[in-house]
Image: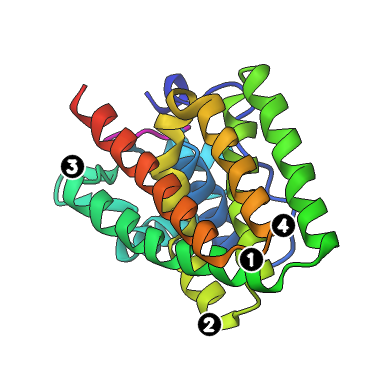
Amino acid sequence: MLSAGLPQGAVPKLERPGPLRDRVYEALLELITTRALQPGQHLVESELAGHLGVSRQPVREALQRLNTEGWVDLRPAQGAFVHEPTEAEADQLLTVRTLLEAEAARLAAANAGSAGVAALESLCAEGEQAVAADEVDEAVALNAAFHAKIMDLAGNTVLAGLAAQVDRRVRWYYTPVARQRGRQSWIEHRELIAAITARDEQLATRLMREHTEHTRRSYHEQAKS
């Protein structure tokens, strides 16, 4: 049952303005990317509608959109299921992520000022606290915010736009390895901050490439276990 598969308090409130179908889509996508709805889980329209406090129509529309985007599989005579990514899919996306983020780190080292570095330091401190408290969801969110800030400091809107297209799927793949990566991930973040502060573009590029590669390897190790 869906109700047994959702942690207490996991269902987001539909409070933001905008068309209901869009708000339902965003709510379901958030539940999928945080893995409150697990890969392979059966998605029953009536149950989802009940959890979200809406009719079945916007849920059906949201599921169709999620199917188009590859988040949900619609199977004839069976219904909707959260997509189960293959290792090849994950590998391709995480490889693209490495290319984008390595360039972002290089540009951040070239462009970042003291305020940008301070913002990275603050996010890193919060991430370390989340890991110490074993708050996995918070650590995942802060990890995404840290990488987004580096992308922002890069100052390249085209690069940022490309990264935004893969950001949510990166979170989806990172969530199951967040505890495994744990403190080491934030140690690597500290090293990245030092390279950006020193304006060492080559070092920042190398560290980011190694950092994202560690995540890619961790994902494949977790998938095989």
- Rendered location of residue 216, percent (x, y): 32, 44
Give the Cα separation between the discs numbered 2 and 4. 24 Å
C-alpha span from label 3 to label 2: 40 Å
Rounded to the nearest angstrom, the CA distance separating label 3 from label 4 is 54 Å
- Mark nearer the viewer, 2 or 4: 4
Quickly name the residue at label 2. Answer: 158
Q: Residue furthest right?
A: 115
Q: Which residues are magenta?
A: 36-41
Q: Nearer the viewer, mark 3 or mark 2?
A: 2
Amino acid carrying mark 4 in the image: Thr
Task: Indicate the amino acid at tag 3.
Answer: Gln
Depth check, mark 3 against mark 4: the one in front is 4
Picture disc at residue 109: 1
> Residue sitting at 74 percent across and 57 percent down?
16
Q: Which residue is mark 3?
A: 78
Q: Position of residue 34 (x, y in %)?
A: 50, 38
Q: Earlier in the sequence, mark 3 or mark 4?
A: 3
Give the percent coordinates (x, y) of residue 211.
45, 45
Q: Which mark is residue 197?
A: 4
**Type of residue at label 2?**
Val
Q: Main secondary structure of the magenta part?
A: loop
Residue 93 lies left or right of residue 212; in this view the side is left
Q: Which badge, 2 or 1, is on the more N-terminal residue?
A: 1
